[in-house]
Image (cartoon, rainbow, N blue to C red):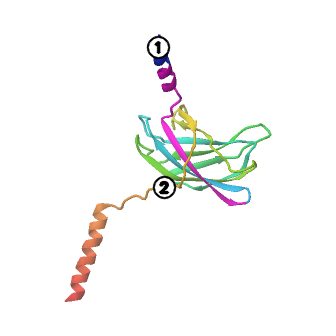
């Protein structure tokens, strides 16, 4: 009997909702009730690239959404919340070239907005969307990052670096003679 109870508890606790994607946010107060979220998206367990995602903004708590920053080769779209419908607003980002590969992360997605609530804005719902079929591949809630997650800077092309070094070295030899 004890084994059955132990097995049940083990299976029950292991069956908690797990998302294949993690979206971290860092929140900054700009001035007054104007805030900015900066997001980093991590493809934890999806087997395909993340090519599009949508983050929702509560119609009763947010207004005046503006996309502030977006990584290169990503196209942002902002739809304002409409409390008259009522309908949440959202920030959607679409990869123009390649998405976020499994195991990779990408930061630098920014949204500024007016917060109508009390205190500091919190986490939000998100969907990972198939860019061609619009099927929802994953859903979850954003997680607060304790410090801003740095945006990765792409490394320069190796051939370009070596060429630049060669020309500097050749120019230096020339001026020394």
Q: Is residue 8 above or below residue 60?
A: above
Q: Is residue 21 magenta?
A: yes
Per the image, the residue denoted by label 2 is 72
Judged from this view, the residue extending furthest toward the bottom is 177
- For the point 58% across and 54% down, which residue is it? 110
Per the image, the residue denoted by label 1 is 2
Judged from this view, the residue extending furthest toward the left is 177
Q: Is residue 11 magenta?
A: yes
- For the point 74% across and 45% down, which residue is it? 61
- For the point 63% across and 41% down, which residue is it? 124
- For the point 51% across and 34% down, which residue is it? 19
Q: Secondary structure at mark 1?
A: helix
Residue 87 in the figure: left or right of residue 139: right
Q: Are marks 2 and 1 in contact (CB under 8 Å)?
A: no
Q: Does label 2 or label 1 sit earlier along the sequence?
A: 1
Image quadrant occupied by the C terminus: bottom left
Residue 120 in the figure: left or right of residue 157: right
What is the CA distance from the residue labelled 2 to the residue labelled 1?
A: 56 Å
Between 5 and 74, the one lying in front of the other is 5
Q: Residue 126 is drawn in which quadrant?
A: top right
The region drawn magenta spans 9-31
Between 67 and 120, the one lying in front of the other is 120
Q: Secondary structure at mark 2?
A: loop
x%, y% of residue 80? 70, 46
Which one is in front in this view, the residue at disc 2 or the one at disc 1?
Answer: 1
Q: Is residue 97 visible?
A: no
x%, y% of residue 27? 61, 53
Judged from this view, the residue extending furthest toward the top is 1
């Amino acid at each position: 009997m004890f084994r059955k109870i132990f097995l049940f508890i083990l299976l029950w606790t292991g069956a908690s909702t797990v998302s294949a994607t993690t979206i971290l946010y860092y929140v900054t107060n700009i001035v007054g009730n104007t805030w900015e979220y900066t997001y980093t998206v991590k493809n934890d367990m999806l087997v395909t690239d993340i090519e599009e995602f949508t983050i929702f903004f509560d119609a009763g708590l947010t207004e005046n959404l503006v996309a502030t920053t977006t990584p290169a080769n990503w196209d942002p779209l902002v739809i304002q919340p409409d409390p008259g419908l009522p309908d949440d607003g959202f920030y959607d980002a679409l990869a123009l070239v390649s998405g976020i590969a499994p195991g990779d992360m990408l930061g630098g997605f920014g949204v500024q907005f007016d917060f109508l609530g009390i205190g500091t804005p919190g986490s939000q719902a998100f969907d990972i969307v198939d860019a061609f079929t619009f099927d929802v591949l994953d859903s979850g809630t954003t997680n607060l990052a304790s410090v801003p997650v740095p945006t990765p800077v792409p490394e320069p092309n190796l051939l370009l670096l070596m060429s630049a070094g060669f020309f500097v070295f050749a120019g230096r030899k020339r001026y020394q003679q």
